Image (cartoon, helix red, strand yellow):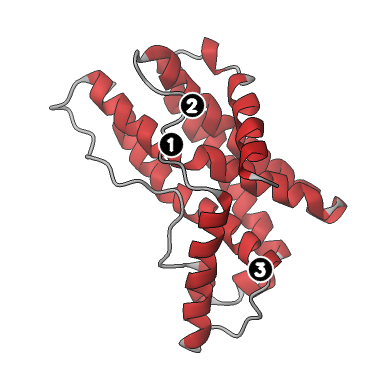
Amino acid sequence: MTYNVLLGAMIITVLGSVASTTHLSSINVIVKALLQPNRINATKQMLNLYPWIRNNWDLKEPEFYIGQKITPLCSGNKTRERNLFTAYEKLSGFVLPLTMAYTYEETKGNQHYRLAKDLKDTSWWLNNTYMAIYHNVSGLPLLPPDQKTEAELDEYTRVFLQALVNDKRVSLTITDDVVKTYRNYTILYTLKDVIREVLSCFQFI
């Protein structure tokens, strides 16, 4: 799937979310009760379907991150808008990658239906949170311009996997499917920490 098609799918999903009517007072609940559990469910499904990830510690708990943006820390010394902007930046790194993840798993058939659904639900609630901030803070871009393409994310993943193979920390044939599958796992793995960081920002709004 091309970058433009993915971007179009993402924009449709984002704009079609119910976040335009979501109050900022609700986003903490949305993240804790909906986004976080769906991310956990999707991760469990990936580990069930892909034992080559589950059975290797370096793959299951990687020192490799996709979507994470280096941003200032949120704090009570900053304005409400500044803390919201930081949370918005953190979430922006996952809007397109999660779309890549669920659209890829949807191509794999019935056995992957549950995983594709959990990924899509994770994407939905992340977009919902993202758009709630967008609708309540003036001057934010719909999507920041520094988004990585699918080809770039795949290349980062391929390089990481090849380094593990070269270091004999994993025995793996690196196919395109392996790269995209592990890219998707790493997106979920990274999102775990980012959700925690975003929740810390919400303490100050």
Sequence-wise first label, 2 or 1:
1
Task: Using residue 86 as the reference point, say whether residue 42 is left or right of it.
Answer: right
* Three-letter code for the amino acid on which mark 3 is drawn: Val
Quadrant for residue 96, please give it: top right
Say which quarter of the image contains residue 50: bottom right
- Kind of residue sitting beneath label 2: Thr
Label 3 Cα neighbours within 10 Å, binned few <14 / some 14-19 / many ≥20? some
Coordinates of residue 13 in the picture (x, y in percent): 64, 27
Q: Position of residue 202 (x, y in %)?
A: 33, 28
Q: Which mark is residue 178?
A: 3
Whole-number angstrom distance, CA of label 2 to CA of label 3:
30 Å
Apparent side of residue 7 relative to residue 90 in the rendered image (left or right): right
Q: Name the quadrant of the C terminus.
A: top left
Q: Which residue is mark 1?
A: 91
Could you give the CA–CA distance between mark 3 and mark 1, rounded to whole angstroms? 25 Å
Q: Nearer the viewer, mark 2 or mark 1?
A: 1
> Residue drawn at (30%, 32%), measured in percent from left and top?
86
Q: Which residue is mark 2?
A: 129
The relative height of residue 170 versus residue 27 in the rendered view (above or below) is below
- Whether 43 is drawn above or below 121: the answer is below
Q: Residue furthest top?
A: 21
